[in-house]
């Protein structure tokens, strides 16, 4: 008789949990996973996937206008939020089914209920059933942070955006990170008046300053209103149904919807982790070593719940590394250097490696190359929106240590270019590559 009910019990069926579950099961482990909401996690159900579909929908606003300059007799078009919303949610349902099927196909037992840790090898399900496992993997992700002040409960987060009954005419978005700027661009293209409120005057902290400055310029040109050095005092619901938002150092503003995009908090509250000796940091994240092991040697954690790098591909790699190391006999650790990232704003941004300021601080001697241009499509469309590409090189070796861009299809272009940066190629390698003309990406090999 087996010592434990399972070899592995996973709490959370998001990107990291699903990958760890199915790969561990493929190695022959007896695996179960508990998910209290829907299989697929934040990215698939209420994050990057449905958000990207909204981004695609928003792009049609400009594309329809530009089409007239290209000879298409496009009439004035109305936008129907309910149609897009329902189609996006239908696709989420499809993906939820696929992820569920993946677990089933790999003989992973699923429990659609909350699970808490009650011992180093024990889990309690919401139904009251106790199960044991040799290893427990916490992959519960994170949730949006909502600041506390009078009336803050009247606002929503990115979780609820995808379920809005109707498109708000006036939207206030709190935050300066990628979620705030992405939804600002989306709602602005849908025709809402967007006000973005931030505690500082810096948006997209951590991204290259040239890219975030360019996005701010373009966003202002598109009509997005920014209010910096702002703190919330209160939100009050008026008889009309509108929300009166009172801010520090600014006049009150009346809007129809307030969206909080003020960071994300690891989902560890009430999981029982501290009771069994798992150490959490000051933000509630599970503290783990390079092999994803917590302070309890039978309990591991991957993904956003560890608050290392909150990106879906990283959670997937951590889940893969866990399974390979524990059950596959192929121990390895995730390399967190040179991770590409993107902001699906309007226009989108993407970057990999060091920013200019990081390179100056770390390397001292650097060389910076730039290309500031207007995409060919924007020229004919008479759209005064310029793209910016920046390459940062080690001043001594010529090695490319950072690549950053803002402009149409920047994330699609950056993914391939990130391979060159990760591989440690030099500026000369880019210079020796023949340009693919006419494309925007050719600017990568033509920068001076």
Image (cartoon, rainbow, N blue to C red):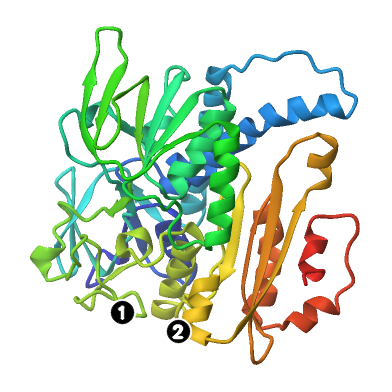
Q: Which residue is mark 1?
A: 289
Residue 11 figure quarter: bottom left
Density class for disc 1 (Cα within 10 Å; few <14, some 14-19, many ≥20) is few
Q: Which residue is mark 2?
A: 331
Residue 362 or residue 67, whichever sits in front: 362
Residue 66 or residue 266, whichever sits in front: 66
Q: Is residue 70 visible?
A: yes
Q: Is residue 78 left or right of residue 269?
A: right
Quadrant that contains the C terminus: bottom right
Work out which residue is located at the far bottom of the displayed protein and give it. Answer: 396
How many callouts does the rendering have?
2
The residue shown at (46%, 54%) is 204
Work out which residue is located at the far left of the displayed protein and give it. Answer: 275
The residue shown at (49%, 68%) is 317
The residue shown at (79%, 76%) is 430
**Up/down of 57 relative to 31, above or below:** above
């Amino acid at each position: 008789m087996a010592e434990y009910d399972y070899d592995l019990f996973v709490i959370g069926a998001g990107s990291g949990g699903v990958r760890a579950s199915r790969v561990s099961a493929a190695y022959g482990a007896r695996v179960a996973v508990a998910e209290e909401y829907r299989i697929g996690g934040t990215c698939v159900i209420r994050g990057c996937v449905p958000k990207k579909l909204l981004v695609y929908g928003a792009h049609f606003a400009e594309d329809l206008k530009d089409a007239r300059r290209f000879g298409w007799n496009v009439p004035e078009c109305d936008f129907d939020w309910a149609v897009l919303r329902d189609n996006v949610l239908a696709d989420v349902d499809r993906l939820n089914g696929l992820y569920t099927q993946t677990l089933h196909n790999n003989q992973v037992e699923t429990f659609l209920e909350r699970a808490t840790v009650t011992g180093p090898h024990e889990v309690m399900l919401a139904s009251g059933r106790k199960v044991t496992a040799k290893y427990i993997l916490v992959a519960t992700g994170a949730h949006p942070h909502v600041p506390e002040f009078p009336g803050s409960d009247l606002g929503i987060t990115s979780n609820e955006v995808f379920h809005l009954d109707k498109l708000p005419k006036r939207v206030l978005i709190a935050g300066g990170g990628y979620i705030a700027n992405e939804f600002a661009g989306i709602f602005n293209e849908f025709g809402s008046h967007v006000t973005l409120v931030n505690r500082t005057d810096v948006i997209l902290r951590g991204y290259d300053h040239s890219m975030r400055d360019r996005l701010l310029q373009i966003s202002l040109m598109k009509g997005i209103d920014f209010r910096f050095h702002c703190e919330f005092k209160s939100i009050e619901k008026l008889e009309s149904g509108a929300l009166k938002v009172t801010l520090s150092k600014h006049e009150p503003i009346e809007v129809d919807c307030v969206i909080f995009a003020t960071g994300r908090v690891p989902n560890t509250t009430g999981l029982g982790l501290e009771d069994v000796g798992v150490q959490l940091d000051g933000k509630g994240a599970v503290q783990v070593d390079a092999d994803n092991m917590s302070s309890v040697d039978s309990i591991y954690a991957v993904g956003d719940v560890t608050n290392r790098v909150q990106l879906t591909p990283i959670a997937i790699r951590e889940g893969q590394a866990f399974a390979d190391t524990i059950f596959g006999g192929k121990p390895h650790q995730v390399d967190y250097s040179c991770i590409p990232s993107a902001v699906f704003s309007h226009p989108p941004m993407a970057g990999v490696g060091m920013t200019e300021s990081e390179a100056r601080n770390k390397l001292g001697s650097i060389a910076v190359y730039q290309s500031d241009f207007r995409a060919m499509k924007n020229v004919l469309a008479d759209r005064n929106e310029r793209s910016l590409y920046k390459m940062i090189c080690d001043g001594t070796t010529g090695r490319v240590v950072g690549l950053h861009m803002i402009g149409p299809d920047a994330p699609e272009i950056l993914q391939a270019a990130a391979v060159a940066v990760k591989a440690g190629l030099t500026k000369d390698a880019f210079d020796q590559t023949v340009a693919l003309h006419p494309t925007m990406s050719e600017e990568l090999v033509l920068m001076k």
